[in-house]
Image (spheres, rainbow, N blue to C red):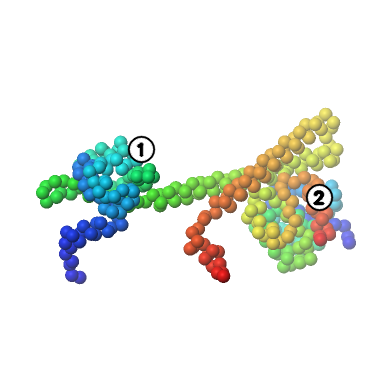
Amino acid sequence: MSEPRILVVEDETNVRELEAEILREEWEHVDTAVDGTDALRLLAENVYSAIVSDLAMPKLDGRGLFHEVERRYPASQRRLVFVTGYAEAEEYDEFIRQSGVPVVAKPFTIADLVGAVQRAFSPA
Amino acid sequence: MPRVELSPQRYRELVEQSRGLICTHDLAGVLLSVNRAAADRLGYAPEELVGRSLADLLAPAVRHLFPQYLDRIRRDATDEGLMLVVTRAGDERIWTYSNVRGRESGGTEYVLGHAHDITDIKRSDARAGEAEALRSVGQLALATAHEINNPLTVIMASLQLMVTRGQVPEPAAAYVQRAIKSAEQIRDVVRNMSRITRLELSRQAPQLPAVIDLSKSSAPRD
C-alpha cells in the first residue's frame, strides 16, 4: 500500500491545526477539513488510511459524515475515529454505541490520538 | 327545560354530599356548619368543628392574617384566594377559597365558604419548577464543559508537543510538567462534572404514572 494519508475533520481551528501537527510528526500526508461537507469533498479526491473526525460540527456533523461514508465509500467506514468531549457525547451516545466507531476523548494526549490512528490503519 | 324547585332538605343534601369543601361561619370567624367533605379533609367530624374559630384551622404561619380576611369579607362581602390549613394530623394543605357574606331571613349575617384542596397540584407544580431549574443548570454545566474541552485540548497537546519535540530547555521543563499536570487536573474536574451532571439529568427524566407509561402499559402479560 502507498504512504498512509490521514484526514482530520474539525471545525475548531486551533484543535484542527494541532491534531494535524501532531499527526504530521508521524505521517507525511495529513489533510484537514472544516466540517463533514468539506471532508466529503476531499474523500472524493483521495483514499484515506484514517479519518479523524469531530462529532459536533456545523453543516454535516460526525454522524452525518459516518452515514455518507457508509453510503459512498463503505470500505473507508472502518477507517473512522471520532474525537469528542465527554460533555457532548450524550447526544451521540446511542449512535457511537451502534456504529462501533472508536472514540478519542477530548482533551486527549498525543499517545491517545496517534494510537487511535494507528489502529484505524488496520481495523479489527 | 322545566325549572326544578329544590326543597331545603334537598339543598342540605346537596351541600352534605358535595365533594367541594363547604362551611359557614359568623362575622367573627366562628364556624356554624361544615360539610362532610371539608371535615374529612381536615381529619375531624363536622360536629367537632362547629363552634370553633376558622382561625384555629389555619397553619400557624398564616394565622395572623385572619383578622384581615374578616375585615375584607365584612367590607366587600366577598373574598377569594389561597389559605393554608392544617389537618388534625398536622399536615399543611393549600386550599383555594371563594367566600361570600350572606344574611339569614332573621337578619343575622354569616359567611358561606367554598373551597378546593389544590395541595397536590401546587406541589407538583413546585416539583416541576425545581426539576426544570435543575435541568437548566445541568445543561449549562454540560455546555460549559464542552466550551472548556477544546481550549484545554489545545493547551495540553501543545505542551506535550513541545516536550516530545525537545523544545523545552531544562530550566523550563519543570514548569511545563507542572502546567501539564494542572491541565490534567482541569480535565478530570470537567470530566467528573459532566459525568455527574449527565447522571443527574437522566435521573430527572419524568416519572410517568404506569397508565401513561407506554413501556409499562404495553408490556406483555403472562
Tell me: B123 left or right of B172.
left
Between residue B48 and residue B188, name the one nearer to us.
B48
Q: Residue flagged by tag 2: what amino acid is it?
A: Val
x then y, percent, for residue A45: 78, 62
Q: Residue furthest right?
A: A1
The quarter holding residue A52 reads bottom right
Residue at figure coordinates x 32%, y 52% from the top left: B40
Residue at figure coordinates x 89%, y 61% from the top left: A1
Q: Is residue A83 visible?
A: yes
Residue at figure coordinates x 69%, y 45% from the top left: B150
Q: Which residue is mark 1?
A: B61
The quarter holding residue A37 reads bottom right
B11 over B2 or under it: above or below: above
x then y, percent, for residue B107: 11, 47
Q: Output the chain of dot 1.
A: B
Quick one: quadrant of the C terminus of chain B? bottom right
Q: Is residue A22 visible?
A: no
Residue A114 bears which disc, if any? Answer: 2
C-alpha distance separating marks 2 and 1: 66 Å
Q: Residue flagged by tag 1: what amino acid is it?
A: Ala
Q: Output the chain of dot 2.
A: A
Tell me: B17 left or right of B171.
left
x then y, percent, for residue B210: 50, 61
